[in-house]
Image: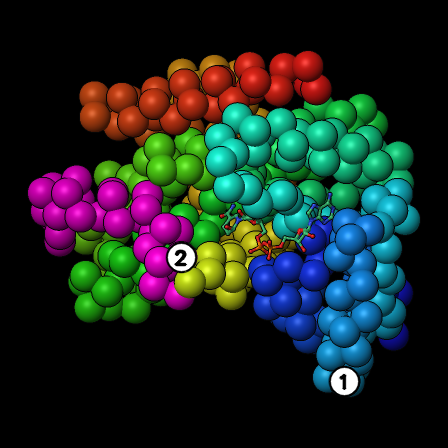
Amino acid sequence: MKAPVHIAVTGAAGQISYSLLFRLANGDLLGRDQPVVLRLLETPESLSSLPGVEMELRDCAFPLLSDVVKTADPYLAFHEVDIAFLLGAKARGQGQERKDLLQVNAEIFALQGRALSRAAKHTVKVLVTGNPANTNALIALSNATELTAANFSAMTRLDHNRAVGLLAERCMCSSADIVRMTIWGNHSANQYPDLAYAEVRGVPALDRVGRAWFQEVFIPTVQNRGSAVLSARGRSSAASAANAALAQMRNWLFGTGESDWVSMAVLSHGEYGVAPGVMFSFPVTIDDRRVKVVQSLELDQHARERLALSERELLAERDMVAHLL
Ligand code: NAX
């Protein structure tokens, strides 16, 4: 039997976690021969919900689940972890503005960055989902002095999957027929879902769907899908978010292959003219756990304007939390 891999999940009593944990314990991330220890982090106020989650995990009798650790101490949660899913964040309260949300979450991610740096393995892969995800990831990275940008990403895989799902529905094909979907920028309504390089069974997607549908339907539908799910379901996306987190981490650990790319927010080093030092979603390929931004795609004027909008938003968010970077 292999030694267990330690996986931290923050916000463990929340709704995304409630979909994610059971799939992790079932081997959906690391395979059916890899035992796992799940290390669950919650706030002191919500810690009392975790025993119920643990009972259900144990009631599944997953052969791969070696142990469950429940704690409100980030240093214990991140102790020697190989993988961390940072789901936990404060939701926007009534009357709070986006900048208030940024501030309150900034402190959480600064603390968690320090704890990851001290407690986790130096090869840890940290995927930030809690919103505002891109800037939270930047804060965690900036505070993790023993770790590097290669340890951190923010999740735009749900946006990517939403875009693939929407295009597949429009073209009446399987999602497996679609390659080279791209989400650029911030995980917010200013992201840019781009079809310029996407293909459907080898045919350029724009030839299949036309530019009008792309600009008038596809872009706003993907950008606003989170709000649409919230109003239709009465709760925000959960199972699809857990699925996306799993997919992004699987690609990070096991690669993308050469024929396709995925979207992932990583630290910008100035690619495509984006300011260095923000977590920006790019098309990436992954090999041997190393993420490479796809180079040399041509961007038209429309795309450049959309990227610039997302970049400005991320720079403004970065300015608001400058004291924690
Ligand atoms: P929930 O409100 O159901 O759960 C969040 C949990 O985090 C709560 O149990 C809370 O007690 C816990 N928490 C808060 N502060 C914490 C801290 N300092 N340490 C540990 N736990 C803490 O939210 P859920 O629906 O699970 O969503 C989690 C986060 O994902 C939210 O920030 C949400 O906005 C974000 N999302 C991000 C997405 C993305 O694509 N990047 C999409 C889905 C989702 O909306």
- The image shows residue 197 at horizontal and vertical percentages of 27, 41
Q: Which quadrant is the N terminus positioned in?
A: bottom right
Mark closer to the chain start, 2 or 1 = 1
Q: Residue furthest front?
A: 95
- The image shows residue 325 at horizontal and vertical percentages of 69, 18
Does residue 322 lie above or below 180 as drawn? above
Q: Left or right: 164 with respect to 43?
A: left
Residue type for callout 1: Asp
Tag of residue 59: 1
**Of helix, strand and loop, which one carries label 1?**
helix
Does residue 13 lie above or below 285 as drawn? below
The crowd level at tag 2 (other Cα within 10 Å; few <14, some 14-19, many 20+) is few
In reply to whether residue 290 is colored magenta, the answer given is no
Mark 2, residue position:
230
In reply to whether residue 221 is colored magenta, the answer given is yes
Residue type for callout 2: Leu
Colour scheme of the picture: rainbow
Q: Closer to the camera, 272 or 294?
A: 272
- Region rendered in magenta: 207-233
Residue 200 visible in the shown view: yes
- The image shows residue 148 at horizontal and vertical percentages of 72, 28
Residue 269, image quadrant: top right
